[in-house]
């Protein structure tokens, strides 16, 4: 199952209203259920980017039915953000541990930047973490 955040769909006239209990700032709509999930994923990513930019907490991912899936790179960046906060470290600390410049570290937290996997792995190792993955059947 893909990880992301659970969304709630509610018929609202000719459209479907989409909300996300874990991220109350997410409110969007779609013309049908398929579009509602697609726009929900985009809205969730924008909400996550705003929270990262503002230094706010991000709730843990959910899985199960009703989940708006997120891109793997987005999930990795969110996990990195949460791990950095859990370690009580700053981006400057991560920069020193990785021995890179500030812009390199900042890009790791920009959800609109196509960071390379090896950079994320290096950042995770600098936090004493390891990235692993699994492949599973699609829902």
Image (spheres, helix red, strand yellow):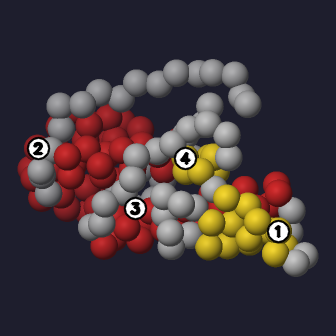
User: Which mark, residue 4?
Assistant: 4
User: Which mark, residue 97?
Assistant: 2
Q: Nearer the viewer, residue 82 or 104?
A: 82
User: Which mark, residue 42?
Assistant: none
Q: Label 2, label 1: how many angstroms apart (C-alpha)?
A: 50 Å
Q: Earlier in the sequence, mark 1 or mark 3?
A: 1
Residue located at (52% from left, 21% from top): 134
* Comparing labels 4 and 3, the label whose residue is closer to the camera: 4
> Is residue 132 toward the left or the right of residue 17 in the image?
left
Q: Considering only vertical position in the picture, is 132 above or below 75?
A: above
State yes or no: discs 2 and 4 in contact (Cβ < 8 Å): no
- Element carrying mark 2: helix
> Is residue 48 toward the left or the right of residue 86 in the image?
right
Q: Label 2, label 4: how many angstroms apart (C-alpha)?
A: 29 Å
Q: Label 2, label 3: how many angstroms apart (C-alpha)?
A: 19 Å
Q: Nearer the viewer, residue 16 or 37?
A: 16
Residue located at (72% from left, 28% from top): 138
Is residue 127 at least partly visible in the picture?
Answer: yes
| Residue occupied by mark 1 | 11
Q: Quadrant of the N terminus?
A: top right
Please rate how many residues cluster around mark 2, counting C-alpha atoms within 10 Å: few if below 14, some from 14 to 19, many from 20: some
State yes or no: discs 4 and 1 in contact (Cβ < 8 Å): no
Residue 103: image quadrant is bottom left
Instruction: From the top left corner, tell me how far across and down residue 54 is, in percent.
Output: 31, 73
Q: Nearer the viewer, residue 16 or 97?
A: 16
Please rate how many residues cluster around mark 3, counting C-alpha atoms within 10 Å: few if below 14, some from 14 to 19, many from 20: some
User: Which mark, residue 110?
Assistant: 3
Q: Earlier in the sequence, mark 2 or mark 3?
A: 2
Q: Considering only vertical position in the picture, is 27 above or below 102?
A: below
Q: Quadrant of the C terminus?
A: top right
Residue located at (90% from left, 76% from top): 14
């Amino acid at each position: 199952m893909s990880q992301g955040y659970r969304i709630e769909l509610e018929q609202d006239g000719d459209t479907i209203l989409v909300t996300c209990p874990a991220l109350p700032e997410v409110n969007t709509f779609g013309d049908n259920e398929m579009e509602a999930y697609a726009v929900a994923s985009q809205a969730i990513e924008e909400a996550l980017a705003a929270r990262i930019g503002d230094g706010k907490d991000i709730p843990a991912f959910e899985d199960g039915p009703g989940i708006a899936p997120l891109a793997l790179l987005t999930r990795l960046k969110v996990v990195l953000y949460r791990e950095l906060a859990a370690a009580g470290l700053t981006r400057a600390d991560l920069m020193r541990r990785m021995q890179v410049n500030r812009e390199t570290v900042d890009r790791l937290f920009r959800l609109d930047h196509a960071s390379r996997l090896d950079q994320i792995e290096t950042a995770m190792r600098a936090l004493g973490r390891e990235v692993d993955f699994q492949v599973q059947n699609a829902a």
